[in-house]
Image (cartoon, rainbow, N blue to C red):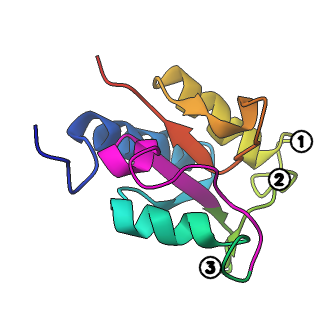
Amino acid sequence: MPVPSDLHPIVKQNADALKAAAANKGITVVITEGFRSFKEQDELYKQGRTKKGNIVTYARGGESYHNYGLAIDFALQKKDGSIIWDMEYDGNQNEKSDWLEVVEIAKTLGFEWGGDWKRFKDYPHLEMIPN
């Protein structure tokens, strides 16, 4: 079976549904990562090890759901257009974290959240195994 080169159609459909449902709550979601090749994953794995920067993944090429089109990373977009990764931001001013509202929506769509992981909290990460 060939390795995919894009998001799985169901993951893409649910990512679009996530963005639409969040928009209905006054939250703009930006998908910052989707499919990632094995080579791109290996380069990301080097970060914080043999390359400058913080460690952002423990997955090498072939070990990430991104490599199979089954994961996305997201961020929030403020009204001024800036992109943020702020889990406390409440841009829709409903006294709830916009980030956690997005996570709640994502879970209803069948995504698992990297923020629930025990070993390495990956707060922007959502992944899914389509049925």
Q: Where residue 131 sits in the image (x, y, percent)?
A: 28, 16
Q: Is 129 in the magenta?
A: no
Q: What element carries label 3?
A: loop
Q: Where residue 116 sits in the image (x, y, percent)?
A: 73, 29
Main SS of the magenta part reads loop
Span of residues in magenta: 53-75
Q: Where residue 13 sits in the image (x, y, percent)?
A: 29, 39
Check disc 1 and report the residue beneath it.
95
Q: Do the residues labelled 1 and 2 touch (CB within 8 Å)?
A: yes
Q: Residue 90 carries which label?
A: 2
Name the quadrant containing residue 105: top right
Q: Where residue 34 sits in the image (x, y, percent)?
A: 40, 56
Residue type at the position of mark 2: Asp
Q: Which mark is residue 81?
A: 3
Q: Which residue is drawn at 63% across and 53% down?
A: 27
Q: Give the side of residue 36 with respect to residue 123, left or right.
A: left
Q: Earlier in the sequence, mark 1 or mark 2?
A: 2
**Neighbours of disc 2 within 10 Å: few (<14), some (14-19), many (20+):** some
